[in-house]
Amino acid sequence: MYDIFIVAIIFGATFGVFYLYFSTRNKERLSLIEKGADASLFYSAKKKKTYPWLTLKFGMLFVGIAVGTAIGILLNSNFSLYPEELFLFSMIFLFGGLSLIWNFMLERKLSKKDDEAE
């Protein structure tokens, strides 16, 4: 019974946050337009490229975590150590970190190519 309330509260809170965000944004835009600001201010032609490879970074991180989990489980089943989760957690962090290092080198290489192309 309590599970239904928890799910309802989570969905209600999520809906409330989005509702407040969009209604506040709408009121702010309407007040700017009433004061004489141009509506093109809200729709800029040039999008900012703040994090162009963010999806690549998260993708590589999650693949590294998955590979680390698989290797940790394999090592845990073949070798027995006292803390049974030792291989699992160490391999998750090892391969997650290695994937982020690999991502950094790949992003640096791609950004150099972009700079040379411009």
Image (cartoon, rainbow, N blue to C red):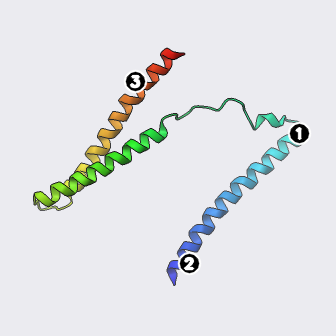
- Residue 86 shows in this picture: no
Could you tell me how far apart the alpha carbons at marks 1 and 2 are, in whole angstroms? 44 Å
Q: Earlier in the sequence, mark 1 or mark 2?
A: 2
Mark 1 vs mark 3, foreground winner is 3
Q: What residue is shown at x 74% (from left), y 49% (from top)? A: 25
Which amino acid lies under the numbered mark 3 shown in the image of this protein? Lys
- According to the picture, the residue beneath numbered tag 3 turns out to be 109
Residue 112 in sight from this viewpoint: yes
How far separated are the C-alphas under marks 1 and 3? 47 Å
Which amino acid type is marked by label 2? Phe
| N-terminal-most mark, 2 or 3 | 2
- How packed mark 3 is, by other alpha carbons closer than 10 Å (few <14, some 14-19, many 20 or more), is few
Q: Residues within 10 Å of mark 2 (few under 14, many from 20)?
A: few
> Nearer the viewer's eye, disc 1 or disc 2?
2
Q: CA distance from mark 2 to mark 3?
A: 50 Å
| Residue topped by disc 1 | 35
Q: Which residue is mark 2?
A: 5
User: Percent x, y for residue 13?
Assistant: 61, 65
Q: Is residue 81 above or below residue 37?
A: below
